[in-house]
Image (cartoon, rainbow, N blue to C red):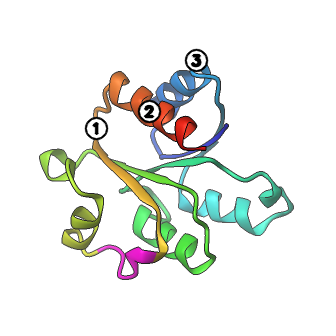
Amino acid sequence: MRLAIVDDNDGFRRFIRTTAEMEGWSAFEFEDGNQLIQHYDSAEAEVNFDLIVLDVFMRHRDAFDTMRFLAANHVQTPIVVVSGGGDMLHGDPALYLRAAGGVGKLENLNVISVLGKPVSLNDLRDILRMTVAAV
C-alpha cells in the first residue's frame, strides 16, 4: 500500500510516515500541494497512491486548491484531510468542506475522513487499516 503525506510540517510528516511504515505501508512525502501536483504531472505519476493524507493549511498550495486539481484530473484516491482547526473538523467530511468554503464539486472527491491535529495514533492506525481492508 502506498501513502502520500502532504504537509508542510516535517515532524508531522515523520509521525505519519513512521506509523504508516509500522503498518506495512510505503510512504511518500510532499511539503505542499504543489509537490503532489508535480508528482501527478511527471513521469512518476505511474506511482499511484492508495491513500492521501492532506493538510489544509500549507505554503504555496493549500488542501482546497490541491483537491480541486485532484477532482479535475479524476483522481479517486481516498483522502484524509487534517488540520489544526480544532473541533469543527470532527464529523462529516462533506459538511466540513462545505462549511470551510473549500471545494464546490465534492462528488468528484473521495474524502473519507477529516481529523484535527494533533492526530491520535489510534485514529491514524484505524484509517490505515480501514483502507487496507477496503482494497
Q: Crowdedness of circle 2 by 10 Å Cα count: few (<14), some, many (20+)?
A: some
> In the rendering, at what x and y percent does residue 37 appear?
64, 65
The residue drawn where x is 72% and y is 53% is 48
Q: Under tag 2, what secondary structure?
A: helix
- Distance from label 1 to label 2 (Cα)? 9 Å
Q: Quadrant of the C terminus?
A: top right
Of badges 1 and 3, the one in the foreground is 3
> In the rendering, at what x and y percent does residue 122 appear?
34, 23
Q: Amino acid at mark 2?
A: Phe
- Distance from label 3 to label 2 (Cα)? 16 Å
Tell me which label, 3 or 2, sits earlier in the chain.
2
> In the rendering, at what x and y percent does residue 41 appear?
75, 69
Q: Which residue is mark 1?
A: 117
Q: Amino acid at mark 1?
A: Lys
Q: Under tag 1, what secondary structure?
A: loop
By secondary structure, the bulk of the magenta-drawn segment is best described as loop
The residue drawn where x is 57% and y is 22% is 23
Q: Quadrant of the N terminus?
A: top right
State the mark number for residue 12.
2
**Along the viewing direction, whichever of 25 and 133 lies nearer the viewer:** 133
Residues at circles 1 and 2 in contact by the CB criterion of under 8 Å: yes
Q: Which residue is mark 3?
A: 22
Q: Amino acid at mark 3?
A: Met
